[in-house]
Image: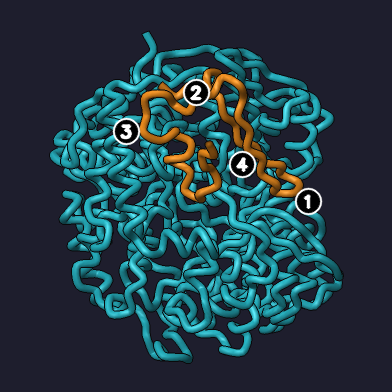
Chain colours: A orange, B cyan
């Protein structure tokens, strides 16, 4: 399901400046069970990476 | 239980009574999927042909398809439909951004707006609740300031806003509806209809989940579609340079093949030195980044900055059509003035395509001595006078002085002025049309036969392959197929500008309809193979055609190009002398009507065709009105 209220990650954009902010909260489990966190996998711009 | 892939609810808003009601989306979704499909069905069923264009009884529908708000690529689109103030037929527009996804998260798939509020209001949608909010303080504001004000009042910078600017408030026919400050649902006067209802905006914020029927299969379908996109070299180029940056570099066919009519369509070829000053590669310094709509794996819209000088401006938006509207059509080659003009249209809520057609026509009238400074509030409408263009946009949006003369579209203006100006008033079925159609026959035929009247977002073939521009071969069939494919895009909420990436006719990407059928089936649980999906697309197209016949009275004669493009050839450049062959056009119309099963003489639909599409009731209504071929 696609459920914004359960998402651990958030992308927002300031429409006055076009500055894009990415945030991740403490509930993120790096999509446990997945090979790659889905936000990393589906970020077409390569803006997200896992840093261990 | 909420249906998979849908918010599950259609919201009906009676602005006159200030009342909202709801009904289940699935009442319509099985036969019309969503978005434009559901809009078309409700509009046809419920709008009486006697309703005038800006009457409170006219309807304004916002529809978001099932794929919107999911991981499906390119799925952000909102379809907006009404009875068009330009044509009296179907008015249909569409935009991306982030509003559509938020509308679903707020709990609604479709909005059906009727009536007129006594005072300005905006509609607030949040987690299954709908509320009409006083908008007196917003009336008169630009679309940008409206978004700022609503977000500020809600203390939430993630609220998504779609609404009108001063142009819509003043019921200017070229008014559009702007989402997220930059995404224009342009054409068909949808902004004028919204303004006539005293509805300033719709704002949404939500956290309602969208469930998936078959998650594993859906993710596999997403991965397959994205893989296909990444295989296409242009995906990377768009991401780096934006759509305009890629498709309009100097020397590209886009400049030479008639897609950008010059000086109100007097020619289709522009001076190369002027092209160089506004081509994609030379406009780069003004582009600070590329932005993407919700769920888009590519991104195509630039953030433009003119840092200083008289045209200082900053904001999202500059598009292929911008260089048509504010460069070639008015012969202006100042990139900073053109960027300023485009971003001004976003703020004022003007559709740059429609607005520039009326302005281009006025410039030609001035050139021919039909208009003078006495008429134009002292403005010198000489080709290349970009300051006059910018001033006219403001006047148009506020119906101020000469702007008011242009505010009902080029057809109305030409009828009032006369003097032969009707000959070069470029409109199709009554709607101002920005598209050049003399060179690329597939593009032109799709533009002219579009039920949304003179728009390239229906059957127009988006193949930029020079060897196919001039050919009439297979055009009717390709347009017929593209119409169905575009309906699928609009029903699901998918962006057309995946075209070339997932287009049904692009060899590099193959069978896009297959991807969309698989995505939609796995998401919703509906059994949609390509054949069934395309058939639903055909059904929606036929509904709109029937609406046009019933409300607009259109027949075959309305499927001819504007007089200028019918009679005048291209004057210069590599396609000099190119024109529309009248016999070929007639042959194409015969073939096209034949493919559709419509009567070639009148262009009317037949009972047999409508029944085969499950539209027996539509046939009955047309027959009662005496507009069904027998």
Quadrant containing the N terminus of chain B is: top left
Q: Which mark is residue B219?
A: 3
Residue at the spot of label 1: B398
Residue at the spot of label 4: B179
Q: In this view, does B409 lie above or below B109?
A: below
Residue at the spot of label 2: A29
Left or right for B216, reference B74 = left
Pointer 3 local density, CA inside 10 Å: few below 14, some 14–19, many at least 20: some
Relative image position of residue B79 (x, y in whole percent): 47, 39
Please indicate, yes or no, whether residue B627 appears anywhere in the rendered image: no
Q: Residue B171 carries which label?
A: none
Residue B224: quadrant of the picture:
top left
Estimate the spatial distance between the alpha carbons at disc 1 and disc 3, rounded to whole Å. 48 Å
Estimate the spatial distance between the alpha carbons at disc 4 and disc 1, rounded to whole Å. 20 Å
Residue shown at 52% from the left, 42% from the top:
A49
Q: Of label 1 and label 3, which has the lower sequence position?
A: 3
Which SS class for mark 3? helix
Disc 1 chain ID: B
């Amino acid at each position: 399901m696609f459920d914004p209220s359960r998402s651990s990650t958030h992308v927002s954009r300031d429409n006055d400046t076009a500055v894009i902010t990415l945030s991740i909260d403490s509930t993120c489990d790096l999509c446990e069970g997945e090979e790659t966190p889905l936000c990393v996998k589906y970020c077409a711009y390569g803006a997200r990476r896992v840093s261990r | 239980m909420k249906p998979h892939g849908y918010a599950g609810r259609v919201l009906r808003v009676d602005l006159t009574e200030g009342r909202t009601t709801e009904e289940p989306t699935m009442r319509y979704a099985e036969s019309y999927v969503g978005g434009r499909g559901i809009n078309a069905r409700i509009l046809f069923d419920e709008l009486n042909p006697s309703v005038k264009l800006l009457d409170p009884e006219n309807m304004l529908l916002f529809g978001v398809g099932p794929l919107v708000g999911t991981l499906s690529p390119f799925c952000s689109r909102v379809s907006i439909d009404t009875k068009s103030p330009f044509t009296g037929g179907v008015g249909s527009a569409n935009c991306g951004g982030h509003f559509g996804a938020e509308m679903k998260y707020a709990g609604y798939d479709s909005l059906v707006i009727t009536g007129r509020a006594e005072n300005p209001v905006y509609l607030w949608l949040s987690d299954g609740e709908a509320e009409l909010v006083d908008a007196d303080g917003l009336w008169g504001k630009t679309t940008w300031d409206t978004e700022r004000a609503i977000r500020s009042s809600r203390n939430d910078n993630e609220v998504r806003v779609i609404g009108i600017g001063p142009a819509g408030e003043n019921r200017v026919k070229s008014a559009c509806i702007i989402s997220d400050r930059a995404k224009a649902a342009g054409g068909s006067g949808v902004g004028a209809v919204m303004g006539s209802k005293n509805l300033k905006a719709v704002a949404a914020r939500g956290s309602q989940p969208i469930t998936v029927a078959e998650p594993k299969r859906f993710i596999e379908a997403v991965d397959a579609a994205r893989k296909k996109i990444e295989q296409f070299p242009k995906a990377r180029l768009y991401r780096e340079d934006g759509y305009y940056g890629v498709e309009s570099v100097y020397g590209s066919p886009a400049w030479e093949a008639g897609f950008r009519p010059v000086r109100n369509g007097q020619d289709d070829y522009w001076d190369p030195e002027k092209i160089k000053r506004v081509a994609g590669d030379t406009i780069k310094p003004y582009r600070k980044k590329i932005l993407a709509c919700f769920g888009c794996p590519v991104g195509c819209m630039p953030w433009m900055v003119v840092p200083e000088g008289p045209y200082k401006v900053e904001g999202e938006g500059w598009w292929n059509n911008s260089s048509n509207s504010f460069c070639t059509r008015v012969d202006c080659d100042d990139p900073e003035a053109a960027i300023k003009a485009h971003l001004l249209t976003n703020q004022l809520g003007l559709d740059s395509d429609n607005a520039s057609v009326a302005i281009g026509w006025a410039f030609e009238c001035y050139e021919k001595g039909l208009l003078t400074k006495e008429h134009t509030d002292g403005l010198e409408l000489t080709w290349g006078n970009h300051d006059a263009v910018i001033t006219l946009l403001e006047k148009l949006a506020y119906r101020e002085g000469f702007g008011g003369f242009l505010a009902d579209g080029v057809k109305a203006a030409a009828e009032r002025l006369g003097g032969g100006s009707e000959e070069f008033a470029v409109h199709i079925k009554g709607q101002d049309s920005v598209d050049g159609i003399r060179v690329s026959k597939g593009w032109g035929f799709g533009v002219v036969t579009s039920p949304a009247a003179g728009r390239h977002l229906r059957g127009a073939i988006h193949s930029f392959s020079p060897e196919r521009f001039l050919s009439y071969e297979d055009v009717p069939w390709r347009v017929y197929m593209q119409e169905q494919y575009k309906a699928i895009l609009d029903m699901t909420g998918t962006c057309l500008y995946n075209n070339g990436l997932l287009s049904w006719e692009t060899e590099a990407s193959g069978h896009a309809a297959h991807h969309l059928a698989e995505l939609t089936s796995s998401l919703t649980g509906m059994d949609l193979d390509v054949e069934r999906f395309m058939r639903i697309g055909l059904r929606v197209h036929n509904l709109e055609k029937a609406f046009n016949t019933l409300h607009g009275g259109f027949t075959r004669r309305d499927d001819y190009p504007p007089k200028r493009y019918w009679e005048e050839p291209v004057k210069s450049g590599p396609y000099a002398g190119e024109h529309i062959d009248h016999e070929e056009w007639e042959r194409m119309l015969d073939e096209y009507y034949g493919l559709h099963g419509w009567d070639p003489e009148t262009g009317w639909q037949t009972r047999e065709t409508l029944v085969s599409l499950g539209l027996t009731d539509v046939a009955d209504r047309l027959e009662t009105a005496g507009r069904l071929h027998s």
